[in-house]
Image (tube, helix red, strand yellow):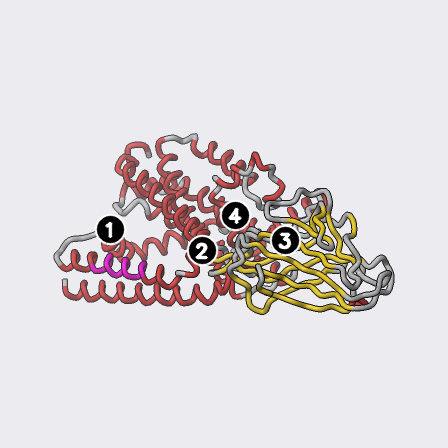
Amino acid sequence: MLNGALNLKRIIISTLAVYIALVVSFYFLAGDQLRYRDSSGNVDLLPAESGTVEMSQGAVIEQNIRLNIQRLNSVSVQFGVYYRQNSGTVIMELWRGDGLLLQQSYDAADIQEGMLLTLSSDTPIEDVYDVPLTIRIYGDSEPGAAVTPLMNTTQPAKDGFSLYLNGEQAEGMLCFSAYGTDSIWMGLHYWELAAALGVLLVLLFFVVWYRYRRGKRSFIVSTLLAVKKYRFLIRQLVSRDFKTKYKRSVLGIFWSFLNPLLMMLIQYFVFSAIFKSNIPNFAAYLIIGTVMFNFFSESCGSSLTSILGNAGLITKVYMPKYIYPLSRTLSALVNLAISIIPMLIVCLVTGVRLKKSAILALFFFACLFIFCLGIGMLLAASMVFFRDTLFLWNVLSMVWMYATPIFYPETILPDKFRIVLLINPLYYFLKSARMCLMDGISPEPVMYIKCFLIALVTLLAGAAVFYRKQDKFVLYL
């Protein structure tokens, strides 16, 4: 008992050390994206429809605005020059009440038709959310040689927006844009939340260790003992499934490398040459989706027959029955690991600049594995009692493929069909992995929690159904 307790202590200490390493690594890999995100209140440039007034000496334009941006980075205004050579100086300012926030002067001779002049700050300006702000523009040019800010007259002015030309209110708004970031509460309190979770883990492990010292087992200890006892068998089953898949194949394991490339090339030709997809870097977008869905389809499809396929072993030798769908999912995981190599090659060849956030994609692949294990256990149990599960799954997996944005952009779906994505777990795994790999940024912290909870709940549901039905398997094999 003492040696066992010491071993359990070692496992607990190692687990806590890994947790600390993961917490620290995630903080630096996620970077500023952990704490700040492009604001949902960013204002895009309106189309220019007319000019305002020339920025000659004495002319003043004031655009009053209220922004739903927590940390303002920049404000830009579009100018027209009437396709002539102008002279003089243009001054742009941003005011908050009586306080000057930003000011910049520009040489009118350098301004071209449709050019954006930008006020930007080295450090984001805070305390501007839903606060009255004013963009003020004036100049010292001679009449006939002055630039003109452009305006839009058809878009209705928002609450808190008003335009004044030389002191008189005018209908319309300046053609301006405003960009900034919003704070993420979970990111700003990351270390506090990580410490709180660490304390909960310590308490959980203490209870497990204390019960084990008193001779009482827990789910965690039972799982560890089962893994230790049957790890050789799991290894053999995974090896058997993997070898059986490529038995008598000329290329053998190379198919795990070649298959996603061939599927990507065919779909790339169909959707880029025939249907004219306008997705940026479509090849990388496509192969990420192909690799992830192939793993989902293979692991769930093979787990479905894992109990029936091992009927001879189950009726003759006792071992935990969950090992069979687990070994099938692990076998598919080996294929996934190989498929990631061509996926990364395609990303690099097509110009994707892999950043440190690419490592975070592994989290969503891990969530996908847990999710597939849960679905696989559900399917394996269902297949024993209801053999039509195989045919139903073939149809469902095809529907699932088309309901997942693998080869089409999610924006193609009308708003009334957005529910298809919102209830699709694969959508969250796939979108987050693409964000890490292609966009080079980390998803919001809530996305990590959402994906983990989806995977965990699916696994618990699959395990619960499997556990309740496993004693009756032998009656239907």
Give me the C-alpha separation between circle 1 and circle 4. Answer: 32 Å
| CB within 8 Å, label 3 to label 1 | no
Q: Amino acid at mark 3?
A: Asn
Q: Residue at x 18, y 63 (%)?
A: 5
Q: Is residue 382 above or below residue 249?
A: above
Q: Amino acid at mark 1?
A: Phe
Mark earlier in primary sequence (3, 2)? 3
Q: Amino acid at mark 2?
A: Pro
The residue labelled by disc 3 is 64
The magenta span reads 196-206
Q: Is residue 89 above or below residue 135?
A: below
| CB within 8 Å, label 2 to label 4 | no
Magenta stretch secondary structure, dominant: helix
Query: Which numbered mark, 1 or 4, is in the foreground of this view?
Result: 1
Q: Whole-percent x and y of residue 152?
A: 73, 47
The residue labelled by disc 2 is 445
Mark earlier in primary sequence (1, 2)? 1
The residue labelled by disc 4 is 294
The residue labelled by disc 1 is 219
Query: Which numbered mark, 4 or 3, is in the foreground of this view?
Result: 3
